[in-house]
Image (cartoon, grey):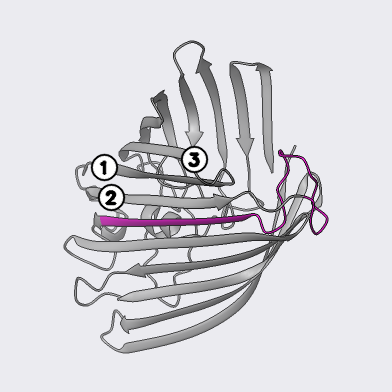
């Protein structure tokens, strides 16, 4: 559920909530636009501005980057909780710049789980002058969580170590062909075959629960959406991660998804996807695993 309240043009209150913690994360914040400065400031609990904010909460650049998802067979890609703090941003020329300082939360927050995070992001978007129906965008992100003193009352897997991540993202969109296959003729509507292709790649230096020393992991997510009929979208995605730079951990894992999404009502979106998971590498006990797991996933978003 997404709830947005705008008492004035310059101020917004926002709330989003999933059905359960395992399928969604709560955001609750206030956001003010600083009129005349091309700037904004946000305070509360929110997803920090890093890379793309994919609507799929289980994209590997969200689950792996922000939590301890490592590709093991019994390690589902659950999204992390979001940070609590402040964020500010501004527009300079054609770029949006933002930075935040938050008290981060892990998948299962505890009273002591208050490690700080610094996040920065630069993003630009432009319509192609020689092809007005195409828009390109891209940017880069960085975050850093300083290490804090070990807590002897917590098990090793719950102690917080220094984490640094960085990456880039980009995409291209095509507005489609208007007046075909049930689409409207106005310039404000999506046309037939309207297409969006997005890609993000990130690297993270961290100490996971199964390791005693820092490792460097890589994550990527690619998403494609094509409108095949008015309100009906073909959706495809490919997620990948790699911990293989350090021996004794899971190695590579990947997920391929394909499905359909539709606004069955103007305020209700439903999507159904088929997902194929696979991974190969060394498990914690030293054996080699090869996994092919399939599942059907349905997701509904309700907007107010």
Can residue 189 be found in the magenta stretch? yes
Q: Few, some or many C-alpha atoms within 10 Å of disc 3 (few <14, some 14-19, many ≥20)?
A: few
Q: Which mark is residue 187?
A: none
Residue at the farthest left position: 213
For discs 1 and 3, the disc positioned in front in the rendered view: 3
On screen, residue 169 versus residue 260, left or right, reads: left
Earlier along the polypeptide chain: callout 3 or callout 2? 3
Q: Which residue is mark 3?
A: 129
Above or below, 17 against 89 in this view is below
Q: Position of residue 5 (x, y in %)?
A: 68, 25
Magenta segment's dominant SS is: loop
- Contact between labelled residues 2 and 3, with CB atoms less than 8 Å apart: no
- Contact between labelled residues 2 and 1, with CB atoms less than 8 Å apart: yes
The C terminus lies in quadrant: top right
Q: Which residue is mark 2?
A: 165
The N terminus lies in quadrant: top right
Above or below, 114 against 163 in this view is above
Helix, strand or loop under label 2: strand
Can residue 109 be found in the magenta stretch? no
Residue at 79% across, 56% down: 180
On screen, residue 176 versus residue 246, left or right, reads: right
Q: Which residue is mark 1?
A: 144
Earlier along the polypeptide chain: callout 1 or callout 2? 1
Q: Which residues are magenta?
A: 179-204
């Amino acid at each position: 559920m997404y709830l947005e309240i705008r008492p004035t043009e310059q101020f917004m209150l926002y709330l989003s909530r999933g059905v359960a913690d395992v399928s969604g994360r709560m955001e609750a914040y206030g956001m003010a636009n600083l009129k005349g400065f091309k700037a904004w400031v946000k305070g509360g609990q929110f997803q920090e501005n890093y890379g793309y904010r994919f609507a799929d909460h289980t994209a590997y650049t969200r689950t792996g980057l922000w939590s301890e998802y490592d590709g093991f067979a019994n390690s589902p890609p659950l999204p992390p909780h979001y940070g609590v703090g402040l964020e500010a941003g501004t527009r300079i020329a054609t770029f949006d710049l933002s930075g935040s300082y938050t008290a981060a939360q892990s998948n299962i927050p505890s009273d002591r789980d208050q490690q700080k995070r610094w996040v920065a992001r630069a993003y630009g978007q432009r319509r192609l002058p020689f092809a007005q129906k195409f828009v390109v965008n891209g940017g880069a992100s960085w975050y850093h969580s300083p290490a804090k003193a070990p807590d002897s009352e917590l098990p090793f897997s719950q102690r917080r170590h220094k984490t640094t991540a960085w990456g880039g993202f980009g995409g291209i969109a095509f507005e489609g062909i208007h007046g075909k296959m049930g689409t409207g003729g106005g310039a404000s509507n999506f046309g037939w075959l309207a297409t969006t292709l997005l890609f993000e790649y990130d690297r993270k230096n961290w100490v996971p629960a199964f390791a005693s020393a820092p490792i460097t992991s890589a994550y990527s997510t690619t998403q494609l959406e094509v409108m095949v009929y008015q309100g009906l979208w073909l959706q495809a995605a490919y997620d990948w991660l790699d911990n293989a730079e350090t021996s004794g951990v899971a190695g590579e894992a990947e997920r391929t998804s394909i499905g359909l999404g539709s606004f069955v009502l103007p305020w209700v979106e439903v999507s159904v996807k088929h997902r194929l998971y696979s991974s190969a590498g060394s498990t914690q006990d030293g054996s080699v695993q090869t996994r092919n797991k399939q599942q059907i996933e349905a997701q509904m978003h309700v907007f107010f």
